Amino acid sequence: MTSWRYICAVTICRGAAWCTASPAACSRRRRLSNFGYAIGVGGTITYTRASKTRNTLAQLPLDALLLETDTLDMPLHGFQGEPNRPERAHLVWKTLCELSPELPEAIAEALWRNTQNPNPI
C-alpha cells in the first residue's frame, strides 16, 4: 500500500476523487479537475504544513470542490489521534474560506450546489 490513496466514483468521464492528501497527489488533483472530476476537500487542509495541498485546493475552481465529511483516518488539526467526524466539516469549510480568494458565501453556495449533483462537473 502506498502512502496515498484515492477512490474515484466514475460515470462516463465524471466522478469524484477523495482522500487525495499527499503532496504527490497535488498535480493529480489538477489533472482530475481538468478532466471533470470533483475533488474532495478534507481535514488535510487544516494543517499549515500541508502547503502544497492547501495551495492546490485554493486554486481549483469552486465547481470542482466537494467537502469531505467522513474520512475517518484523516483527522483535522487539533484532533490528531481521533477519528474524523462529520460534524467537524465546518472546520474544513472555514479553512477553505481562509485559503480561497472567494467570499465565504460563494464557497458555501458552490459546495451546496456541487453536493446536489452526484456527478458534479
Image (cartoon, rainbow, N blue to C red):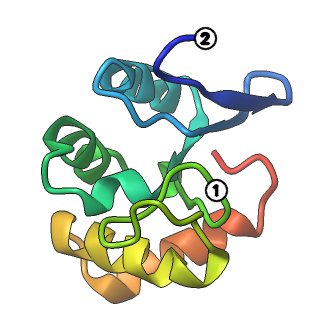
Amino acid on which disc 1 is placed: Leu
Mark 1 or mark 2, which is nearer the start of the sequence? 2
Task: Indicate the secondary structure of the residue bearing disc 2.
Answer: loop
In the picture, residue 101 is in which quadrant? bottom left
Judge left or right: residue 8 versus residue 21. Answer: right
User: Which quadrant of the view contains residue 70?
Assistant: bottom right
Report x, y in % for residue 8: 72, 29
Q: Mark 1 points at which residue?
A: 72
Residue 62 visible in the current orientation:
no
* Image location (x, y in percent) of residue 46: 29, 63
From the viewer's side, name the closer residue of 86 and 28. Answer: 86
Please provide percent x and percent y for residue 16: 67, 39
Q: How far apart are marks 2 and 1 (CA)?
A: 18 Å
Q: Is residue 117 left or right of residue 67?
A: right
Pick whichever, 24 or 79, lies toward us.
Answer: 79
What residue is disc 2 on? 1
* Amino acid tagged 2: Met
SS of the residue under disc 1: loop
